[in-house]
Image: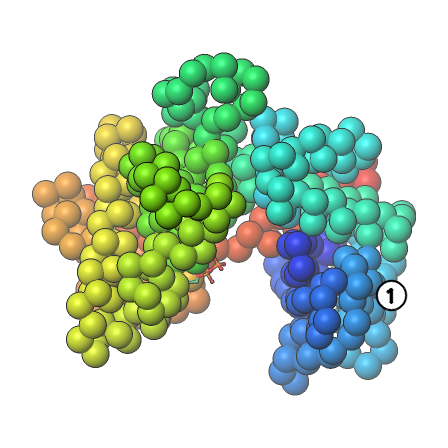
């Protein structure tokens, strides 16, 4: 089964054609500046990356070019689009409607539309992607995989906020979480690595530009650090994570900021970038720290501490922990940050093996010391594969499998 996985942003579109049985990405590409001047498509070929500048006034044109990159005679990877069995869309917000993959029909589209209020930038882009695929490939089944779905298993005590309950009842203000597909994938792999024990207590740390931490109980999300929006939780590249909420109104009053300006400040100009003024990219902060920047060192310490606090919180919520997983850009690649995060936790039975931690690899692996009671794992996340598997299962359940 071959699934085209599409991740539509407001002005970009990432895609991968995945052969599910062979567990292989046949083509991976992206369209940038969709709807703007200077748009281009870029995709991997065996001979290296190929970039073609092309006008893309809308998502339909972007998807048309993406499809052309799959079956063109020059460097296509399939003979014809007939070989694509189904399309899977990654969608940011599924609200309380979706706890697993959904076969896209009119009612699903209506629900995604209804949820635009909760994801004003992301859900409209996803809808454009769905519409374009419907026009360009009307006979292919489409499925939707939601970033929030995995967290729908959280108990109410973990998703209701201590504000007037009417805000939840009337406006659905609650914790939704994010990165669900990634947390689901790495927690399933972790359970396999722990010998298939589905009752293992696991804490998954997805640390990329955005970051979130999830407590996994019986293979399900029990609590997660992102909240009503992805702004909550740990300190991130350019997002502040959780701060005293009174700071928000204080700054708005003092600086005369509108809610849009305040949102922008918290989402794009805070976190590692806000504290250092250097970058939102940990590699650059690390370089600056090595050159003696005090503020870069402070930001690294703050970042690690913010992760440690959530790990501590979730150890309490799970009444212990069997495995801790590190994934995404920072979790997979920064041995330095992992060293900081796991320093001096030996009284909790958590001990890193510094040599194993320093090894660079694309493989899922253990990095804990032999005598550590808790396993520490690095597991590269594979959200697109997870989506492709979900879509294959959806097709089987709907009698659409080849
Ligand atoms: P996104 O959330 O945009 O998908 P990624 O998962 O790609 O982000 O993570 C981006 C982060 O990963 C950046 O802060 C970057 O500095 C960090 N990162 C990537 N590679 C390395 C590396 N080799 N060492 C340290 N940090 C890294």
From the image, tell me which residue sits under label 1.
80
Say which residue appears at 63% left-offset and 82% top-offset: 48
Say which residue appears at 24% left-offset and 30% top-offset: 316
Q: Is residue 204 visible?
A: no
Say which residue appears at 67% left-offset and 59% top-offset: 11
Q: Nearer the viewer, residue 270 or 349?
A: 270
Q: Position of residue 105 (x, y in %)?
A: 80, 34
Give the mark count: 1
Q: Position of residue 369 (x, y in %)?
A: 19, 56
Label 1 environment density (alpha carbons within 10 Å; few <14, some 14–19, many ≥20) = some
Horizontal side of 267 relative to 90 (left or right) equals: left
Mark 1: secondary structure = loop
Q: Residue furthest bottom?
A: 47
Q: Is residue 114 above or below residue 327?
A: above
Q: Nearer the viewer, residue 136 or 78?
A: 136
Q: Position of residue 38 (x, y in %)?
A: 71, 74
Say which residue appears at 50% left-offset and 20% top-offset: 168
Q: Nearer the viewer, residue 53 or 386?
A: 53
Q: Position of residue 313 (x, y in %)?
A: 25, 35
């Amino acid at each position: 089964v071959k699934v085209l996985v599409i991740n539509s942003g407001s002005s970009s579109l990432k895609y991968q054609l995945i052969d599910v049985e062979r567990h292989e990405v046949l083509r991976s590409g992206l369209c940038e500046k969709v709807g703007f001047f200077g748009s281009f498509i870029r995709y991997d070929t065996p001979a290296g990356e190929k970039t073609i500048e092309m006008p893309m006034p809308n998502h339909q044109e972007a998807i048309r070019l993406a499809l052309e990159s799959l079956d063109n005679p020059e460097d296509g990877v399939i003979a014809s689009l007939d070989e694509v069995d189904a399309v899977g869309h990654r969608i940011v917000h599924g609200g309380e409607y979706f706890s697993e993959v959904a076969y896209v029909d009119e009612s699903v589209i209506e629900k995604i539309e209804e949820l635009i209020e909760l994801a004003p930038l992301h859900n409209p882009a996803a809808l454009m992607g769905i519409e374009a695929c419907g026009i360009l490939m009307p006979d292919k089944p489409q499925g939707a995989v939601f970033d929030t779905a995995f967290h729908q298993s959280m108990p109410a005590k973990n998703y209701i906020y201590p504000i007037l309950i009417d805000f939840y009842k009337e406006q659905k203000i609650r914790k939704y979480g994010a990165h669900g597909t990634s947390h689901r994938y790495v927690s399933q792999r972790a359970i396999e690595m722990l010998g298939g024990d589905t009752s293992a207590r696991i804490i998954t740390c997805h640390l990329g530009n955005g970051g979130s931490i999830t407590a996994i109980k019986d293979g399900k999300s029990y609590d997660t650090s992102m909240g009503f929006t992805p702004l909550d939780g740990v300190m991130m590249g350019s997002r502040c994570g959780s701060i005293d909420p009174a700071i928000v109104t204080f700054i708005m009053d003092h600086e005369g900021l509108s809610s849009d300006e305040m949102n922008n400040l918290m989402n794009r100009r805070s976190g590692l970038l806000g504290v250092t003024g250097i970058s939102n990219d940990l590699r650059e902060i690390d370089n600056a720290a090595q050159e003696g920047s005090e503020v870069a060192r402070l930001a690294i310490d703050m970042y690690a501490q913010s992760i440690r606090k959530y790990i501590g919180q979730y150890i309490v919520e799970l009444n212990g922990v069997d495995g801790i997983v590190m994934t995404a850009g920072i979790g997979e690649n920064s041995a330095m940050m992992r060293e900081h995060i796991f320093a001096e936790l030996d009284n909790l039975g958590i001990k890193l093996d510094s040599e194993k931690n320093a090894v660079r690899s694309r493989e899922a692996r253990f990095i804990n010391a032999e005598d550590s009671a808790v396993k520490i794992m690095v597991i590269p996340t594979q959200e697109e594969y997870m989506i492709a598997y979900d879509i294959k299962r959806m097709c089987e359940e709907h009698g659409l499998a080849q």
